[in-house]
Amino acid sequence: MTTEARIPLSRERVLRAAVELADEHGLRALTMRRLAEELGAEAMSLYYHVAKKEDVLDGIVDVVAQEINEAVARLDSGADWKQAVRRRILTAREVFLRHRWAPELFETRSSTSLAVLRHYDTLVGLMRDGGFSYDLIHHALHALGSRALGFTQELFDPSANQQAEVPPELAAELPNLVGMLGEIAHDDPDSTLGWCDDQAEFEFGLDVILDGLDRLRGR
Amino acid sequence: MTTEARIPLSRERVLRAAVELADEHGLRALTMRRLAEELGAEAMSLYYHVAKKEDVLDGIVDVVAQEINEAVARLDSGADWKQAVRRRILTAREVFLRHRWAPELFETRSSTSLAVLRHYDTLVGLMRDGGFSYDLIHHALHALGSRALGFTQELFDPSANQQAEVPPELAAELPNLVGMLGEIAHDDPDSTLGWCDDQAEFEFGLDVILDGLDRLRGR
DNA sequence: ACCTGAACACCGTTCAAGT
DNA sequence: ACCTGAACACCGTTCAAGT
């Protein structure tokens, strides 16, 4: 009981704990004081291992990016470019589903981690092998945007909209939206504004883009 | 000198000042205390006009969304669906270029403002008139993501990368990326990692998606 | 080398009080 | 009806001090 496990702190241990904290309680809960508490230390001790909070945030982005590279490493790269890129991106997406705080942070970092660059490097290689010019690949990365990394920010937060019926006085102002929702709801009886199959929609958008790029590939 | 202009506060005045503050100094500078100062009042006075800071953030998102609707309202909706949607989205983008803090906030809000819904409603209408099924429109909105509103989050911050030459010891690890950058740089001598023509890339991605959707429209 | 206590300048927010 | 002062619980961070 008095023999507390006294594992020394380290940058790696700090970052690991930060990821865990964000996973469980969200980015808001990730404060230096709370993080230290989780590690059984004082807040000020963290500053021996990380420069500042921004450094922690950069660090956990890198942890996630490495996780992506590991997950993606065990893919055989057979098949045509489109299947290879597609599977790589969908595998990356699985990592983001485990770290739902990550997209916000990825889009907010100004410096790009080596792990992220490695991911892009592989995509560039796959497309190059598929017959793309560098110029088109460059455009392609922009077109994919964060989708290339495996996420999109949902503009309608499903968790917030579980009860989101459109109030009748609004319906008149939004006839087209209401029409669309009505029909979608008809096809799928328990659907509301927070209705969507995120996985299917992610793949739909990805395929629209990949198919479009494939068509441009032949000049 | 003693006759200070004593305009009373109001929710609208608070939100207007908040937008201005964010425009000039970024979201980080938007604190209740600083905002009050800008208005010549005490921080606590704001709470008579807004519920809490989250309310301010929701409010300025709405201000931007209204600005989009105004900008877009004076477009004649002639032409085919693709041109109509395209011009609407590019006009919305102009608004985001004036409020560079807005994308981060839009993707972070959980409740969607009426002004945003109105924008989507119009897009749905235009696509419906263009012969789309509601089902396809629904997929289309997901595929477009935040692009439908007029922005994408840039994963590589151009301002941070103005000097970003890839260091030689990294080059070996990122052969494809380096290859691509080399060729892009060759075409355009003053380009680096922070090279991109954001407007052109936005339009490229938008067109890949719109063209892809157009092809799906005929079943 | 690694950790901590006390302290500083800043947050958002409540609440009772002023006009 | 509108605004404010004092106060509270929380931040990130510095710095001198402990082991």
Image (cartoon, coloured by chain):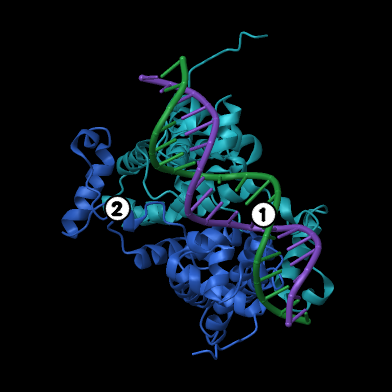
Chain colours: A cyan, B blue, C purple, D green
The quadrant the C terminus of chain A occupies is bottom left
Where, by quadrant of the figure, is residue A218 drawn? Answer: bottom left
Question: Residue drawn 63% across and 59% down?
Answer: B109
Q: Which mark is in front, 2 or 1?
A: 2
Viewer-side residue, A50 vs B38:
B38
Q: Judge left or right: residue B51 versus residue A211.
A: right
Instruction: Give percent across and percent down for residue B137.
Output: 63, 64
Where, by quadrant of the figure, is residue B115 drawn? Answer: bottom right
The quadrant the N terminus of chain A occupies is top right
- The secondary element bearing badge 2 is classed as helix
Question: Residue drawn 50% across and 74% down?
Answer: B20
Label 1 crowd bin: few (<14), some (14–19), many (20+), radius 10 Å: some
Residue B6's place in the image compared with B121, above or below, is below
Looking at numbered disc 2 in the image, what kind of residue is underneath it?
Answer: Asn
- The secondary element bearing badge 1 is classed as loop
Viewer-side residue, A177 vs A152:
A152
Viewer-side residue, B138 vs B171:
B171
Instruction: Please count the marks in the image.
Output: 2
Viewer-side residue, A124 vs B55:
B55
Instruction: Give percent across and percent down for residue B181.
Output: 24, 49
Q: The numbered mark 2 sits on a residue in which chain?
A: B
Q: Judge left or right: residue A118 versus residue B130.
A: left
Q: Which residue is mark 1?
A: A157
Q: Which residue is mark 2?
A: B161
Looking at numbered disc 1 in the image, what kind of residue is underneath it?
Answer: Asp
